[in-house]
Image (tube, grey):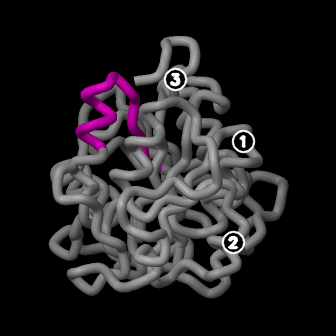
Amino acid sequence: MSPAGNRVKAVLFDRDGTLVHDVPYNGDPDLVRPVEGAREAVALLRAHDVRVGVVTNQSGVARGLISDGDVRRVNRRVDELIGPFDVWAVCPHGPDDGCHCRKPQPGMVLWAAGRVCAGPADCVVVGDIGADMEAAERAGAHGILVPNDRTRPEETAAAAHVAPDLLTAVRAILNGPPRGRVLADERPIEAAHGPGPEGGGQAAGPADGSGPTTIPPATAPGRGVFAPEAGRARAVDDSRGRPT
């Protein structure tokens, strides 16, 4: 563990494609499947007193494909299988809604960091696409990309830090803010680009280890959930056609 003055206070995860296998516009809790190593990674952070949260684009709400209630139910299932998480930040807006929260804008990262009483510089955002990394950079946080088969090669090449799986990312985080572009374990980083063992595209980790919208908290009182009004700045859709 890193010295007290050089430790990460919070880790904010993307949801779809990072913590759970990506099911486009998922509104069914029964379809939630954690990626390999997700439970262990979150448990390891909690064991070291690092706060954990989720920052997730859910434009299916704006598109009319899923409801606020669907998002809450899916998030609750993620909490049951992997969490509990200290904070949930959800952007229900579409790419043309001009909101300040939708990744790659920094709004959700800044809000979630505030909810867990951590400065952005003491936070790490872990995600699977360039929009996650850009949101972290704009917020002043650190970013670690964990690629899967939906991650574009140019996104991996542009990322400041890349890990082949969640457990590798978390083990690096426990040593302090990430340093070095590639955070690799005994397996080559190229393994992160192949499909996972369950076909979800996530590399397997080591065996050990709009107008205003309101989405109420999915679980216990006091846990934050973010679903802000559209901001003035127009968000750039960095998903390049991927449904987020």
Q: Is mark 1 on a helix, strand or loop?
A: helix
Front position in the image: 108 or 21? 21
Q: Can the viewer see residue 40 in this picture?
A: yes
Q: Nearer the viewer, mark 1 or mark 3?
A: 3
Relative image position of residue 123 (x, y in whole percent)? 56, 34
Return the residue at label 3. Answer: 7
**Quick check: can you spot residue 229?**
no
**Label pair 3/2, CB-CB below 8 angstroms:** no
- Most extreme residue toward the top is 4
Residue at 58% from the left image edge and 27% from the top image edge:
114
Q: Does the magenta stretch include residue 51?
A: yes
Q: What element carries label 2?
A: helix
Verify CB contact (< 8 Å) between mark 1 and mark 3. no
For label 1, the residue is 139
The mark nearer the N terminus, 1 or 2, is: 1
Task: Single out the residue that lies furthest toward the front.
Answer: 186
- Residue type, numbered disc 3: Arg
Tell me whether circle 1 and circle 2 mark residues in contact (CB < 8 Å). no
Q: Give, as a three-letter code, the residue at label 2.
A: Ala
Residue at 48% x, 69% y is: 189
In this rendering, the label closer to the viewer, 1 or 2: 2
User: Marks 1 and 3, how far apart in space?
Assistant: 18 Å
Residue 157: give its label.
Answer: 2
| Residue 205 sits in quarter | bottom left
Residue 162 location (% of width, % of height): 56, 60
The range drawn in magenta is 42-54
- Work out whether mark 3 precedes mark 2 in sequence or the reverse, and give the earlier one: 3
